[in-house]
Image (spheres, grey):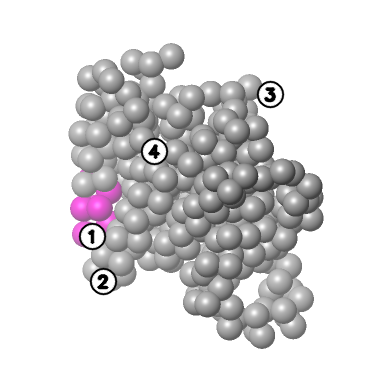
Amino acid sequence: MPAPALFVVSGLTLYLGAAVAVGLFDTLGAPTVSWWRIVLAAVVLVAWRRPWRRRWTRHELLVAALFGIALSAMNIVFYVGIDHLPLGVAVAIEFTGPIAVAAVTGRGWRERGAIVVAALGVVLLAGVTLEGDLPRDDVVVGLVAVLTAAACWAGYIVLGKRVAGAGGGIDALAVGMVAGALVFAPFFGSSVAVVVPDVALLGFLLVVALCSSVVPYVLDQVVLRRVGTATFSVLLAMLPATATVVGAVVLQQLPTWPELVGLALISGAIMMTATGRR
């Protein structure tokens, strides 16, 4: 399948899973829901891939673990962000991470200019959100969380390219998810007593894990083996629009015209990072 088609599937499943997760925040809290997403995704991936059959060097295990920790941190702070901000706005602002990666790895004026365009989009989205109906404290927490997720996403792309280039991307993803689950277990492991006896809750969390972690991140590894880091960042330009559509349809989070302009600016910035490199 062509890379754009894979990204359509990836984006739809990713943000449908996020929409389901939002409904669980009142029960468990956003960070705990995200940790369970990581745990259950790790269980599925390890059962499928059985990564112990592969010969690992110490360096490969270290990179895979760092990859998984960056991915897990990104997921946790992003869920905090969408607990306080509309889904489309949070996703668009988080894209400053991939834009920064493409700008740093590129050499042309378009890559540098993309940072300016993206910054304008972020300022517009943040200003509209601050002036909206949401409590100011919630907006500030959401913005800080999403910008932190953006930094983690940049690390995910760089490390993901390394593990994908080594030829064992999905196996490394399984190892990394286990590492991420273990690192954050001391903070969220106490929820086991609440989740495990509740079969329905566990089932919803499994849906979130499959839709938001297993399917999109496996597809990421497939695509990262075919394209470069900058091109990968460009393909991600389809995801803000996907998140906005899912937020509007599933969560009734209708964007305003200024928000649509901010989304367009950030998507345009992502596209700019690729036009100078093929």
Using a 10 Å C-alpha cutoff, classify the residue at mark 2 as few (fewer than 14 neighbours), some (14 to 19) or many (20 or more).
few
Does the magenta portion include 126?
A: yes
The residue beneath circle 3 is: 1
Residue 24, how many percent across, how many down?
57, 71
**Most common SS among magenta residues:** helix
Q: Is residue 79 above or below residue 192?
A: above
Label ID, residue 137: 2
Q: For numbered disc 2, what is the local secondary structure?
A: helix
Residues under labels 3 and 2: Cα distance?
A: 44 Å
Label 4: few (<14), some or many (≥20) within 10 Å?
A: many
Q: Disc 1 marks which residue? A: 130
Which residue shows up at 74% across the image and 74% down it?
200
Among the 4 quarters of the image, the one containing residue 142: bottom left
- Secondary-structure class at tag 4: helix
Question: In this rendering, would 150 be left or right of 194?
Answer: left
Amino acid type, mark 1: Leu
Residue 10: image x %, image y %?
60, 40
Question: Residue 82, relative to residue 223: is it above or below?
Answer: below
The alpha-carbon separation of the residues under discs 4 and 3 comes to: 23 Å
Can residue 122 be seen in this snapshot? Answer: yes
Q: Earlier in the sequence, mark 3 or mark 2?
A: 3
Mark 2 / mark 4, whichever is N-terminal: 4
| Depth order, front residue of 114/185 | 185
- Residues in magenta? 124-131
Identity, as a three-letter code, of the amino acid under mark 2: Asp
Eye-nearest disc, 1 or 3: 3
Instruction: Judge depth for marks 3 and 2 and give the one in front.
Output: 3
**Cα–Cα span, label 1 and label 3:** 41 Å
